[in-house]
Image: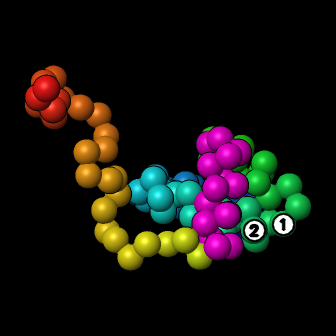
Amino acid sequence: MKKEDFTYEIEKHEKFFYSQLSEREKRLYTGLEAMKIGYYGVSEVSQKFDIHIHTVRRGKKELLQEIVPATKKVRQKGGGRKKNGVNKQSS
């Protein structure tokens, strides 16, 4: 197996793994990858995973400040899209 083929396989599996993560986990993972790369890491990771630079920076910041709550919830209560009339508060 050529080195190029091996690199392609790793990237393919890495992108599949990334697609299975929650929003918070994606942010932390990209922040970690940017830290591993070092200089230009944020822009490289941003291009590789097709996400905004600020998202990578936020993940990096959360890792450096160790802001990782011990909750399993992905969204806050009431977060996300609202269904037609179901989640509206009555006046």
Is the magenta region chiefly helix, strand or loop? helix
Amino acid of disc 1: Gly
Taking the spot 15% from the left edge, 32% from the top edge, the residue there is: 89
1 and 2 marks in contact (CB < 8 Å): yes
20 relative to 50 in the view: left or right: left
- Give residue 85's position: percent from left, percent from top: 13, 24
The residue sitting at 75% across, 68% down in the picture is 35
Q: CA distance from mark 1 to mark 2?
A: 5 Å
Q: Is residue 29 magenta?
A: no
| Image quarter of residue 34 | bottom right
Mark 1, residue position: 38
User: Does residue 8 sit above or below 33 in this rendering?
Assistant: above
Identify the residue position indicated by label 2 in the image. Answer: 35
SS class, disc 2: helix
Question: Is 19 in front, or is 35?
Answer: 35
- Magenta extent: 51-65
Numbered marks: total: 2
Q: Residue 11's x, y, as percent?
A: 63, 58
